[in-house]
Structures are given as C-alpha cells and as structure tokens.
Amino acid sequence: MTGGEGWVLLVFAALFAAALAGGAWLHRKKLERLRSFAAGIGWTYQADAQHLVGRWRGKPFHVGHSRRASHLLAGELDGKQAAAFEYRYTTGHGKNRSTTTYMVCMVALPTALPDLEITNEGLGAKIAKAFGGMDIQFESEEFNRRWRVEARVRKTAHDIVHPRFMELMVAGPPDPIRFEGTDVWTWHLGPIRTEVIHERLTRLSRVVDLVPRHVWQDYGYDPHAGAGRVLDPRSERWNR
C-alpha cells in the first residue's frame, strides 16, 4: 500500500467514524425530544416497541422483512386509549434493498370489529380495481371518487360508512384508515412527528365516535348501557 492510499483510507475511516458519531447524536436527541413530549402530556414512551411487530395483519404491517417498531408514545385522548409509533420494514436485497418508514397513529376500540380499510382512491387502487379488487360503493359519488373501501363484512361497512362519516372523510385529508380487531389506525410515510400526533389522533377519535350504537351492539358492546367488553382507557394497552 502506498502512502497516498494509506491517507485515503484514513480519511474514509475518519469520515465513517464521524458519520457514526453524528447518527448516534441525532438518535439521542430524538429520544430526549420524544421522552420530553410524552412527559409533557402525561403519556408513556418506549424507544423499543418490537413487541408490536406481528400484532396486526393489515397495512402497513404485512409488507417486507426486517420489520421494526420503535418510539412508542401511548396514553389517553378524549377518554380513549391512543398511541403513535414509528414502523419500518425492508424490501429487496443487496443493491435492490430499500427501507420504508411509517408513522402510525392508533386508537383502541371498545370491542373488536371486522376488518374495514378505507384508502385514498389513487393510481394503485384504480389498478387493483381494474384487476377485480374489491371496492364497495356508497351513495356519495364524491366519496366513491376519493376513497376505496374494502371490508370483511359488507353490511358492517355500510353501517359504519354512513352520510356523516362520508362527510368527515370527504372534508378531511387523504389519510387512510383501517379497523382491525380492537384497533383503528392511520399511517403516513416518514418518521414519527410529534407536531401532528394530536391532529391525527383527534380525527381517529371522531371516526370512532361516528360508529353507530347498533354496530357496537352487533359485536357485543353497548356504549349507552356499558354492557359487553369494555377496555379501560387507563390501561397500558400497547406497552410491553
């Protein structure tokens, strides 16, 4: 090895070490910021939330490999259990390897409901429909143009997606929503951002409030009588 080659290696080694140190510093600052945010609103924070991986079937949890869940914020909002966390997965291998990161916001339901997914009517949805993908139609043409609805139980989907629900969806942002089991959530590309948590969870809370009483009753819970299985909003539902 020549002297010049040695200097080049030393420079690369120094740059690599600096990059590692910078990444570690940014990670520590992120942990501090999220801990401070959680403490300020009376929520809990866990940097490692790997116990959440594999809990759900639907988007964005069923894609890729090397799945990771982290930066879990959990607490109470509007009398409901709520959480936000970062979720990432990898697709491909080698030079085709790519990692995708989502921020997930989630609200607990008082009882389990059948799978219901509402996603923006984009190019992917149009292609899926062209190949026979499910898309339930509703009375509102504007809603049908903007949203694609898939559901395990069609009747329940029609009961939940009533006129007031459609008004909320049409007037709001193009955020996807999925009901699965005792949770409802929305997901967005990018890392967790504390400044949008309240807005997104408040929207999900409104979605839950718009579910008709008879739907809850169909699945064993009466919000008026307090009958059936009720989840304590103070319990640490998502924490390890």
Image (spheres, grey):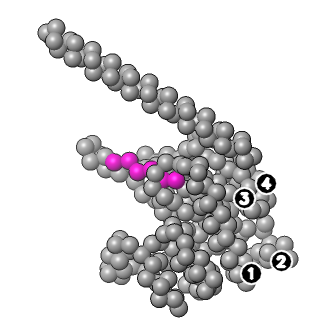
Q: Which residue is mark 1?
A: 213
Q: Amino acid at mark 4?
A: Arg
Q: Which numbered disc, 2 or 1, marks the residue that appears first in the sequence? A: 1
Q: Residue 210 sits in which quadrant? A: bottom right
Determine whether 9 is above or below 165 in the image.
above
- Tell me the mark number nearer the camera, choosing from 3 and 4: 3
Between residue 189 and residue 125, name the one nearer to us: 189
Determine whether 128 is above or below 200 in the image.
below
Q: Which numbered disc, 3 or 2, marks the residue that appears first in the sequence? A: 3
Determine whether 175 is above or below 68 in the image.
below
- Tell me the mark number nearer the camera, choosing from 3 and 2: 3
Horizontal and vertical percent position of residue 228: 80, 72
Q: Amino acid at mark 2?
A: His
Q: Which residue is mark 4?
A: 234
Element class at badge 4: loop
Element class at badge 2: loop
Q: Residue at x 64, y 48 (%)?
A: 73
Q: Amino acid at mark 3?
A: Leu
Badge 2 vs badge 1, beta-carbon distance below 8 Å = yes
Q: Which stretch is magenta?
A: 98-103
In the picture, the disc for residue 118 is none
